[in-house]
Amino acid sequence: MAEVIRMPRMSDTMEEGVIVSWLKKEGDQVKTGDLLAEIETDKATMDFESLWEGTLLHIGAKEGEAIPIDGIIAVIGKKGEDFKAALANAGNGVPEASAPADSTASSKSSESPAPASATAAKPSATAPATDADTDRLKASPLAKAMAKESGIDIASIKGTGDQGRIVRRDVEAAIETGGTAPAAAVTPVFGQESFEEINVSQMRKTIARRLAESKFSAPHFYLTLEINMGRASDARQRILDMSGEKVSFNDMVVKACAMALRKHPAVNSSWMGDKIRRNHHVHVGVAVAVSEGLLVPVIRHTDLKSMTQINTEVKALAAKAKDKKLQPEEMQGNTFTISNLGMFGIEEFTAIINPPDACILAIGAIIDKPIIQNGAVVAGKMMKVTLSCDHRVVDGATGAQFLQTVKQYLEEPMMMLV
């Protein structure tokens, strides 16, 4: 009998998933282990492998459609088998009158990309595609949305997917290489109101829910300290000269925090409702900005790793985060979090605690400014950091002592090497 395929739970916090693209189309043969689809969860875009063998008889979820956990997305069975009977038995029958049209629509929407290198077409001299033209183009809904948002004439992009289908990687390649057609300028009529509505992704929904819960349930208070990064700057250059290895200021902050957490276990703790969990291990989460918000990959046993090891790991995890390829286990287990906006020139900000942590450290930009040192005015490289604390776990004096230790490590970076 035909097997009804349902939306799987692919992360512990997932409530629904979005079909990014189908990698098989109706009528295709499917083997165990074949990739059926790409599914966007609340944490990442993940591959969905088939546990069944047979023919893909029916696709019940369109690309871009959000389906709740256990919702029906497809039917696999023997070639020519009546999938409507399986759907009816599953409580999701297809009306006879609409079945042929639905089947055709599903077939069109399920055409999918095959692995290929991304290439972008040169800018087209033709007029931008109209909505009707766009509908006729073979392009995934995600690719269409990305092209529209970036002001790209999607007709100028060469598709590398199945049968020339334009997929996400093609639009990304066009953006990177500049192979785009400029968006038409829009001159608004005086007094006219307009707006656009953007669907909230699964990731954005989860970020919003978790941060709202944190902000309105954990009593935050904030401690700000200024740190002289002059010696850290010199040490960073010496590490490069001696080993050829690059480390960033962010890597140095991560290392300093990890070592300070070892000395101040109360900060390396979590609120558990009726208990406080004092963690004996140090796992530092590093916030990474992606198009849909923030992801926090976790560096495990951070205090035991060198700054060059931290640098390598942060780079690898950040790249996976931006490609939405982070796995759930790579974003779990954090005992402390760091958020750095210094690279954007932000001098000072406060961050919302990332559960289950008791604290998060916000890092500002390093600013060249005059300071008083030994009674003389000298040039200094100053950086402000702000520690957000959950007052249920960490008291003011405890947070202040932790920051003093972080300051000592960064102002005397050789202490982190012994």
Image: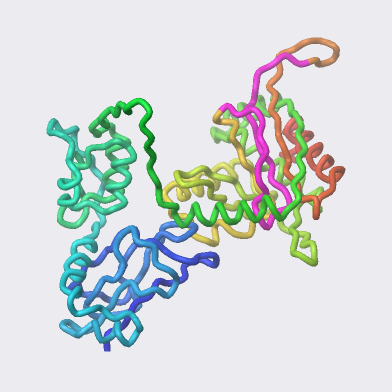
At x 26%, y 54%, the residue is: 140
Q: Magenta stretch: residue 354 in it? A: yes
Question: In the rendered view, does 150 fall on the left or right side of 24?
Answer: right
Residue 327 image position (x, y, % from top left)? 49, 59
**Quarter-of-image position of residue 172:** top left
Q: Magenta stretch: residue 413 in it? A: no
Q: How many numbered badges does the structure rendering display?
A: 0
Residue 359 image position (x, y, % from top left)? 72, 48
Give the vertical position of 303 relative to 182 (above or below).
below
Give the vertical position of 210 relative to 191 (above or below).
below
**Quarter-of-image position of residue 23:** bottom left
Q: Residue furthest front?
A: 191
Foreground residue, 367 or 414?
A: 367
Instruction: Work out whether residue 418 can be spotted.
Output: yes
Question: In the rendered view, does 281 fall on the left or right side of 12?
Answer: right
Name the quarter where the N terminus is drawn.
bottom left
Instruction: Work out whether residue 301 can be spotted.
Output: no
The region drawn magenta spans: 345-371
Q: How is the image coloured?
A: rainbow
Q: Residue furthest left?
A: 126
Residue 291 image position (x, y, % from top left)? 45, 44
Foreground residue, 237 or 51?
A: 51
Residue 326 image position (x, y, % from top left)? 48, 55
Foreground residue, 66 or 277?
A: 66
At x 18%, y 44%, the residue is: 158
Give the vertical position of 265 relative to 74 (above or below).
above
Name the quarter where the C terminus is drawn.
top right
